[in-house]
Image (spheres, rainbow, N blue to C red):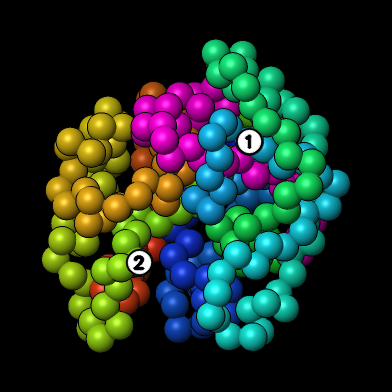
Amino acid sequence: MAAIKETFYISHGSPMLAIDDSLPARKFLKDWRGTLKPNSILIISAHWETDVPSVNAVRVCDTIHDFYGFPAPMYKLKYPAPGAPELAKRVQELLMGSGIKRVHMDKKRGLDHGAWVPLMLMYPEADIPVCQLSVQVQEDATHHYNMGRALAPLKEEGVLIIGSGSAVHNLRALDFQADDVVPWAEEFDKWLEDALISGRYEDVNNYETKAPHVKKAHPWPEHFYPLHVALGAAGEDAKAELIHRSWSLGTLSYASYKFTKP
């Protein structure tokens, strides 16, 4: 069983990432093929919000089309990856062992588009077992970072941990006429890069008081918290690396990061 040294935060942006070749992030994720072959994948998606941490424990993952008003071909896409119920039990065990009183096992839920859209590009064969973990928007970033810390042993078991969200995500501020990145979005995105690369992880955990334009960049935290889980799982001395940056619609960031333990 080969250990995995890295964790990742992937900005999945729009569901159109699944079919739109004009998006640079699509090529970035398709080029992923062959770089890492884990035993299984734990993905934390912005699109599953629950009161308590929850994992799906299914044998085969259904493809959830949790978006509206998109082109018809989007609703025909399937990603029938095997589920990972044993991994779900391990996640439950680790989180409860860290002091979380309740972790729910969902035996019906498949993968939402925050999970299957990037995975369809990264691992198109759909042959790696996948387990999805939810976020809790009523909790703070440190809660999610600590969840990640509890899950760190999974890397030694060959599990690839991926947080899937968007580094800047404000759907009400999308600019369909924009040719350039809107300044406030770029400032937040650059602050995040600087904080991560320089190892200021406490600042990232306390981003609501440390970062510029917080409420514009993330009116709600669900697309940011997957980063904190991936960061916590990497370890306190992990090194952050920006592995992709692109934008769409003026404010939607596809910045993605790798966290590697020395």
Q: Give the quadrant of residue 97.
A: top right
The answer to whether 236 is drawn above or below residue 79 in the figure is: above
Q: Is residue 33 above or below residue 41?
A: below
Q: Nearer the viewer, residue 252 or 72?
A: 72
The structure residue drawn at horizontal position 23% and vertical position 51%, both measured from the top left corner, is: 215
Quarter of the rendering containing residue 77: bottom right
Residue sitting at 16 percent across and 52 percent down?
213
Which residue is label 1 attached to?
54
Towards the viewer: 225 or 66: 66
Q: Which residue is at a point 64% across and 27% down the rendered structure image?
A: 103
Label 2–label 1 contact, CB within 8 A? no
Three-letter amino acid code at disc 1? Answer: Ser
Q: Is residue 231 visible?
A: no
Q: Position of residue 86 (x, y in %)?
A: 80, 32
**Residue 143 is inside the magenta segment:** yes
Q: Secondary structure at mark 2?
A: helix
Type of the residue with mark 2: Leu
Q: Which residues are magenta?
A: 125-151
Question: On the rendered structure, is 245 left or right of 22?
Answer: left
Sequence-first disc among 2 and 1: 1
User: x%, y% of residue 158?
Assistant: 69, 35
Residue linked to disc 2: 171
Q: Residues within 10 Å of mark 2 (few under 14, many from 20)?
A: some
Residue 171 shown left or right of residue 73 in the figure: left
